[in-house]
């Protein structure tokens, strides 16, 4: 769970580490695990080679796989499930394998009104069922709490910072390092050509707990993010067009 801090100490620019090589990003096995895999793999390989039997062949093959895992720091099974025990590789690979969702909805309201509602982040739990609360710290920083997922468990929390903003047009954000969910996104408000409505487009990129396997499990239980976003935007549309909100 993300630790909540206050005041100026809460602001931490979420800059990615620079200078990572592709080899570092490729590694998804931690150093201790690599050492164990290498030693065990070498032992199994030698044992299997001295046994002229099917059992020896299986031992040798298993040993070769473990030895390769230890030498390269890469596990194909980990890659399939988007798992990672290497700290450097974890950040790089999870960013590269993030799930992306984009939805647009037309709302009969002005960009100014929609932007004003959204920019007061405390309003968002009213239209987003999964969001339990939003605490605004200052103009750039906020703390979010989401309800438990389909399988239960602890609440999900994160600190977010606004990284890009054009008044009445665009709000961009990203989670700070150490958050329960790594994500970034934006919402854009574009007036339609006839001036009667606004096209609201939400882009979201995130690395779900459990990687793509976790995202697949969520879909099975009806918690797919694209469906939730569509429902939230429809709720936003109905709320704004019916004026069922208080102006802040």
Image (tube, helix red, strand yellow):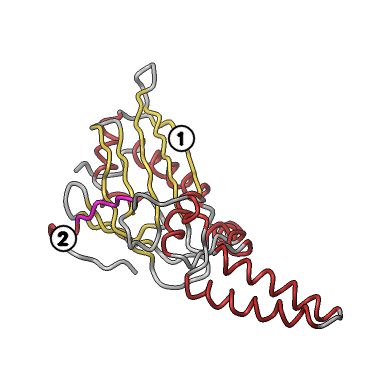
Q: Which residue is disc 1 drawn over?
A: 104
Q: What is the magenta segment's predominant secondary structure?
A: loop
Q: Separation of disc 2 and disc 1 at Cα?
A: 36 Å
**Taking 156 as reference, is 9 left or right?**
left
**Taking 144 as reference, is 208 left or right?**
right
- Which residue shows up at 86% across the image and 81% down it? 53
- Which residue shows up at 34% across the image and 61% down it? 179
Task: Name the spot of residue 135 as percent of width and height, x first.
Answer: 23, 58
Task: Name the spot of residue 75 as percent of width and height, x first.
Answer: 60, 64
Task: Name the spot of residue 139 as percent of width and height, x first.
Answer: 18, 46
Q: Is 117 placed above or below 108 here?
A: below
Q: Which residue is disc 2 drawn over?
A: 9
Q: Quadrant of residue 145?
A: bottom left
- Which residue shows up at 34% across the image and 63% down it? 157
Please tell me which residue lies in front, 242 or 96: 96
Q: Badge 2: few (under 14), some or many (20 or more) residues near its Cα, within 10 Å?
A: few
Task: Name the spot of residue 234 as percent of width and height, x first.
Answer: 45, 42
**Residue bounds of the magenta highlight:** 11-16
Mark 1 secondary-structure assignment? strand
Question: Which of marks 1 and 2 precedes in the sequence?
Answer: 2
- The dot on residue 90 is none
Please tell me which residue lies in front, 89 or 224: 89
Q: How many marks?
A: 2
Please tell me which residue lies in front, 215 or 193: 215
Does the magenta-highlighted stretch encompass residue 182? no
């Amino acid at each position: 769970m993300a630790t909540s801090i206050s005041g100026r100490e809460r602001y931490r620019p979420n800059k990615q580490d620079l200078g990572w090589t592709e080899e570092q990003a490729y590694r998804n096995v931690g150093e201790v695990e690599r050492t164990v895999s290498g030693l065990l793999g070498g032992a199994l390989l030698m044992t299997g080679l001295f046994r002229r039997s099917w059992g020896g062949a299986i031992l040798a093959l298993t040993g070769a796989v473990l030895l390769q895992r230890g030498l390269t720091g890469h596990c194909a099974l980990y890659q399939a499930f988007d798992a990672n025990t290497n700290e450097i590789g974890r950040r790089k690979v999870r960013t590269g394998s993030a799930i992306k969702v984009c939805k647009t909805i037309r709302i009969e309201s002005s960009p100014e009104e929609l932007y004003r509602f959204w920019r007061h982040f405390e309003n968002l739990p009213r239209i987003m069922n999964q969001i339990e609360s939003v605490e605004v710290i200052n103009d750039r920083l906020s703390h979010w709490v989401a309800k438990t997922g389909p399988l239960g468990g602890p609440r999900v929390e994160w600190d977010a910072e606004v990284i890009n903003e054009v008044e009445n047009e665009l709000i961009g954000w990203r989670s700070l390092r150490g958050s329960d969910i790594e994500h970034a996104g934006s919402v854009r408000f574009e007036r339609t050509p006839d001036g009667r409505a606004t096209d609201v487009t939400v882009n979201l990129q995130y690395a779900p707990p459990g990687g793509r396997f976790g995202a697949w499990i969520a879909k099975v239980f009806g918690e797919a993010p694209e469906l939730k976003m569509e429902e939230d935007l429809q709720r936003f549309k109905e709320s704004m067009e019916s004026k069922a909100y208080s102006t802040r």
